[in-house]
Image (cartoon, helix red, strand yellow):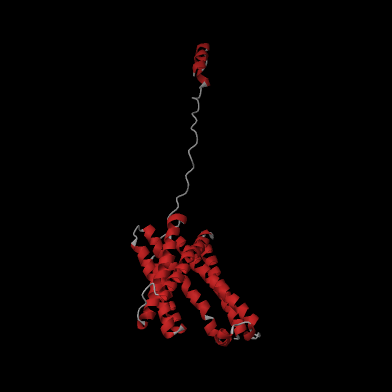
Amino acid sequence: MPATLAYPLNAILMIALPIALGIFLERKFHLGWGLWWIGAATFVFSQVGHIPFNIGLTALFKRGALPTPPEAWLPVFNATILGLSAGLWEELARFATYRWWAKGARSWSSGVMLGAGHGGFEAILFGLMVLISFVNMMAIRNTDLASIVPLDQLAVTQQAVAGFWSAPWYTVLMGALERAFTLPVQISFSLLVLQSFIRRQPFWLFLAIGWHALVDGAAVFTMGIWGAYVAEAVVGASCLLSLVIIFALRQPEPMVEPEQPEPGPIYHLPRPINFEKLETPEELNKSRFL
């Protein structure tokens, strides 16, 4: 498959998969799309703090304001920091959503729908970024890079462009595969945080943060040491474990009792008159007071 087809296909799959999952869940649970969009907004809100935090933290390390570990420990250190950063920002944002926004989302199905929106919108954004990158690469494919790139960056840019177009199709499609793996992972995060409200135990929030940090940290570590294929295998294993978590936390949906009609006013019928006994004028006269 040529790269001109692989990249658009990868982007389309990254966008279509979460939408298809959302349609399936909406038809299965009949919850509407409100919780999906709340989950999507939760992801955006989490990144408003998460991205600047990571940028600021990186700047502090570069300036020497924070101590840098020995080079041998850098892969573990970076994976730990990045994993904890993602876990804290995203799961605390999810906790805030359950606490102050989605107050009625206290069932397993609502937690699944909210998690599908969180991970789904993330996948859609990544798919749009891939599509924009492909369009840009198409625009400069037949352009003399020396005319648009500074000389000190020309060699690096040429290498990046050559690598982009020479990537095998199965490597390109790994982006869509990763997003497919990530959707159940995000749903498991959502359900773990939800347990903090259903079971009224804050332990579940810390468990969600730790699980998130472990998944992201392991992916970052393996990517830096062994490359993308091993990292994808780690994400795939995380997906399988997340499916176990999802179904282990499944609970019966809360019963919704039918609404009882409000009692109307009570009318007392007058005592019937027995006209057969009204034979005499005296009896007729008495009947006036009945």
In this image, 209 relative to 36: left or right?
left
Looking at the rendered image, the quarter that the N terminus falls into is bottom right
Counting from the top left corner in percent of width and height, residue 68 is at 37, 77
Q: Is residue 184 above or below residue 155?
A: above
In the depicted view, which residue is nearer to us: 144 or 30?
Answer: 144
Q: Is residue 186 left or right of residue 136?
A: left
**Residue drawn at x 52%, y 13% as measured from the top left:** 285
Above or below: residue 235 compared with residue 52: below
Where residue 200 sits: x, y (%)?
A: 35, 57
Residue nearest the observer in this picture, 263 or 140: 140
User: Can residue 53 be seen here?
Assistant: yes
229 vs 270: above or below? below
- Residue 40's spot in the image, x, y percent? 51, 64
Total numbered labels placed on residues in the image: 0
Q: Residue at x 49, y 77 (%)?
A: 178
Residue 261: give x, y in percent of width and height: 49, 42
